[in-house]
Amino acid sequence: MPSTQSRYHEVYARWKSDPEGFWREAGREIDWFKPADKVFDAQAGAYGRWFDGALCNTCYNAVDRHAETRGDQPAIIYDSPVTNSKRSISYAELKDEVSALAAVLHDMGVGRGDRVIIYMPMIPEAAFAMLACARIGAIHSVVFGGFAAKELATRIDDAKPKVILSASCGIEGSKVVAYKPLLDEAIQLAATKPDACLIYQRQQLECSRIEGRDLDWAQEVVNTRAAGRHADCVPVAATDPLYVLYTSGTTGKPKGVVRDNGGYMVALKWTMSNFYGVKPGEVFWAASDVGWVVGHSYIVYGPLLHGCTAILYEGKPVGTPDAGAYWRVISDHKVVTLFTAPTAFRAIKKEDPNADLLKKYDLSHFRALFLAGERADPDTVRWAENILNVPVIDHWWQTETGWPVAGNALGLGALPVKHGSPTVAMPGYALDVLDEGGKSVGPGIMGTIAIKLPLPPGCLPTLWQADERFKESYLTTYPGYYNTSDAGYIDEDGYVWVMGRTDDIINVAGHRLSTGGMEEVLASHPAVAECAVIGVKDALKGEVPCGFVVLKSGVQQTSAEVEKELVGLVRDKIGPVAAFRLAITVPRLPKTRSGKILRGTMKKIADGDEWNMPATIDDPAILEEISDVLRNRGVAH
Ligand code: COA
Ligand code: AMP
């Protein structure tokens, strides 16, 4: 399906013919302290390293250089309907805030290569914290606020942070979520203790501080300023980690995705104009959370590297106060592009199906909607197209890649849209679809989507202090490729269709979760003999987890009591974000004769999809029983 207007094919071909030349040129958009010896060193790392030998600083590129040329322009606009407040921070102010906080961190003993965990709500201080770490060469690891203390503890033990930055509370719709008790519990649970914590007090709920460990954020910044202290940008290697971001793996132990400085900057900067079609000075909004990769790449680093104004929104698509919230923000701040998850649009559509609230606002500056984080279902895409009358662009990526693998590059001139497909591979990515034996399948045939090595700049070079786990998880199944663990196909026009995961990761309201991790929690309950967790279709959240449990014989509690405790246990151990509300007791689990639980078939039954009796099943009657239980519980569609 060629397009005469789009430059995509020409640009993709240019990358393919000379990848190093392509990225060398893209690298000119970044200010380096020392340029790379080699744009790509094929001998370094697990599959090569980008911009080897270069020295740079990500905070300098995101903040300082713009403070010199566009100091008065808003860098960040904080818009918080949940606290009824707004704050505009210019590039000059951002430099001042970040360099003062960086000096505080320095005084707390944080230096280049040290880890800093950031467990914070969506307030500007979370972005200051990330940039302050980048400024002094420390490695930040932001942990999403919706995770429970145990998840935070796991990340503390893996990252071994010197200090933790947190706040007294987060505000979730109308609820105030106390962060400090979670932080205290996590530190207690963790084997590795941080030297100190810096706590930002919010007036909605102040917290107490532990003497000798916790410092008051505002006070420390005031003291540092009074002493006239500011920290400068430290030159770091382009290949040094900028951050570690934990994401769900196939077990309860999350994967620490490492992101470097140089390649990440180059890739993000390239996407801002070429993919999102945004110019410096324009207002870019990613309605996500700094705890997710979208928040890292497109609330903080991408827009700031490009000299845009980034919106930091503390609110929901609905209920803060209504389903017109997104239109209000777009109109108030002259947003040109919005990036969010399809689930947010499903939530808006459910509350305001005719988009009546949209009529109240002026969206004349708004140019495009970008969707990612989960499959963009065609109904939602069509609805958004109809009400907004601008391009609605699905794009596919992962925490691991840091930026879009496939999409419709608006900046290069959009290709025709096929609803349900995130369009085509971006320059940097050579995609293939492989069968179980690793053979490339033809167009239109389903398989595992794999990326031919090397991965482009910006993608993970490894997992935090786990090179072997990195290789085993991503590079071993298909030698010469990165295994995305996403299933799908590529059609005759080169359009990619991403249909679901090949592992046990599920996507709940755009949040990535491990069913394996939830199974570990269920199995820890004393009454549970066996369990299986699957993702079942949900009209709002895309998927929600559903746990099947077999109770031990002789258990005194009723199954309803155990189920209630299990729901509480997952919330307690993983966090509210897991949205685990459904535990179902069954007499047995369906298994193959070799003992493998037939999760795929259970999912089909729960989703109301067609299913066949697996030939290898041990006892066919059990699937009928499960089907009945699901119907009785109102789950089977
Ligand atoms: N801190 C503490 N708790 C949090 C949290 C945070 N940062 N984020 C979510 N939670 C809690 C919520 O309060 C909720 O708790 P509850 O069980 O007590 O109600 C639970 O985690 C589930 O949250 P969520 O998945 O957000 O569901 P919701 O019902 O509150 O809202 C949507 C549904 C669709 C409105 C919401 O999921 C949404 O806006 N999604 C957009 C997706 C997105 O931003 N994805 C990021 C990738 S682009
Ligand atoms: P995360 O690491 O949280 O960004 O989640 C990545 C996973 O979300 C991918 O591996 C996909 O399974 C899914 N995903 C993200 N974007 C899309 C999309 N546009 N279409 C289909 N699936 C997507």
Image: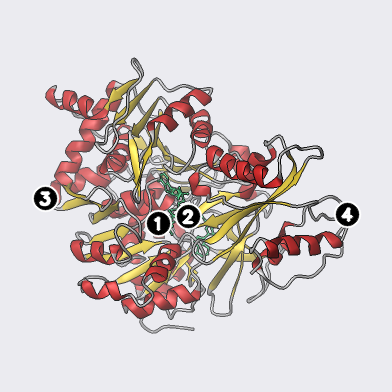
Q: Position of residue 386 (x, y in %)?
A: 36, 80
Name the residue located 48 percent from the left edge and 63 percent from the top edge.
396
Distance from the alpha carbon under mark 3 to that under mark 4: 69 Å
- Category of crowding for the residue at label 4, using alpha-carbon neighbours closer than 10 angstroms: few (below 14), some (14–19), many (at least 20): few
Kindly report which numbered mark, 2 or 4, lies closer to the viewer in this rendering.
4
Residue 63: which quarter of the image? top left
- Category of crowding for the residue at label 3, using alpha-carbon neighbours closer than 10 angstroms: few (below 14), some (14–19), many (at least 20): some
Residue that carries the numbered disc 1 in the rendered image: 23
Distance from the alpha carbon under mark 4 to that under mark 1: 52 Å
Name the residue located 30 percent from the left edge and 27 percent from the top edge.
105
> Which kind of residue does numbered mark 4 sit on?
Arg
Name the residue located 19 percent from the left edge and 40 percent from the top edge.
95
Closer to the chain start, of discs 1 and 3, is: 1
Closer to the chain start, of discs 3 and 4, is: 3
Q: Position of residue 329 (x, y in %)?
A: 24, 61
Instruction: Give the left or right position of residue 553, taking residue 339 as reference.
Output: right
Residue that carries the numbered disc 3 in the rendered image: 72
Instruction: Give the left or right position of residue 251, taking residue 457 as reference.
Output: right
Kindly report which numbered mark, 1 or 3, lies closer to the viewer in this rendering.
3
> Which kind of residue does numbered mark 2 sit on?
Pro
Residue that carries the numbered disc 4 in the rendered image: 593
- Please report contact status of discs 2 and 1: CB closer than 8 Å, yes or no: yes
Closer to the chain start, of discs 4 and 1, is: 1
Q: Secondary structure at mark 2?
A: loop
Q: Is residue 471 visible?
A: no
Q: Front-most of 470 and 197?
A: 197
- Please report contact status of discs 2 and 4: CB closer than 8 Å, yes or no: no
Residue that carries the numbered disc 2 in the rendered image: 456
Q: Is residue 614 visible?
A: yes
Q: Secondary structure at mark 3?
A: loop
Distance from the alpha carbon under mark 1 to that under mark 3: 31 Å
